[in-house]
Image (spheres, rainbow, N blue to C red):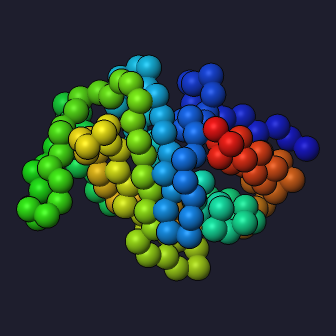
Amino acid sequence: MERIEIRSGLNDFLLLDRIVECGEDKLKAEKHFFCPEQYMPVESCAQAAAFHVRYLCNFDRHTFLLKINYLKGLTVPGSWFFAEEKQDPEEKSLHPVTGIQGRVNIRAEKISCSQSTFAYQVRVSRGEDLLIQGELLIGTTEYSQDLPEERLKPYYQEAFACLLSG
């Protein structure tokens, strides 16, 4: 069997510290950011949503970030991420950030799904302050020769159990 290497540039590809709650419609997690890299909160949200999809699928399908429908609150100069004020007065206003350090709460809430695609509203907050919110699409596919079930399924089951036991 050929070895799969993931070259993220990180020592550990898990970007969640623990899963606080996991139910049929949502997953809540925590993360402590030590560096202000702009992609970290986005990737953490994607991982939270993907772990929730794996949980819903009993870890029987491979999951991946299919699309970022939108993100609000993260200000990255020179990119398409930007801060945007809320139009709906009922929603909490965003506190735009250029980098996040310290402990935050991550929430991934399923808003719709089909047989192979799941839409999630994701939020990153610190206390009452909403830092980032957006919508992500998580795709699923069957395991294959390139994505071997015998290697990936136990890995994600163990990682989920460890994050859940926190």
Q: Residue 141, can we see it? A: no
Q: Residue at x 60, y 54 (%)?
A: 51
Q: Quadrant of the C terminus?
A: top right
Q: Residue at x 18, y 39 (%)?
A: 95
Does residue 5 appear to the left or right of 68 in the view shown?
right
Relative height, residue 121 to residue 46 (above, below): below
Q: Nearer the viewer, residue 104 or 96?
A: 104
Does residue 112 appear to the left or right of 82 in the view shown?
right
Relative height, residue 14 to residue 120 (above, below): above
Please tell me how many numbered marks the rendered image carries: 0
Relative height, residue 138 to residue 93 (above, below): below
Percent from the top left, x then y, of residue 71? 28, 51
Relative height, residue 94 to residue 136 (above, below): above
Percent from the top left, x then y, of residue 138? 51, 61
Residue with the most extreme bottom position: 114
Q: Residue 71, can we see it? A: yes
Q: Quadrant of the N terminus?
A: top right
Q: Within the image, what quadrant is residue 159 found in?
A: top right
Percent from the top left, x then y, of residue 19? 57, 46
Q: Residue at x 40, y 59 (%)?
A: 136
Does residue 143 appear to the left or right of 128 in the view shown?
right
Percent from the top left, x then y, of residue 149? 81, 57
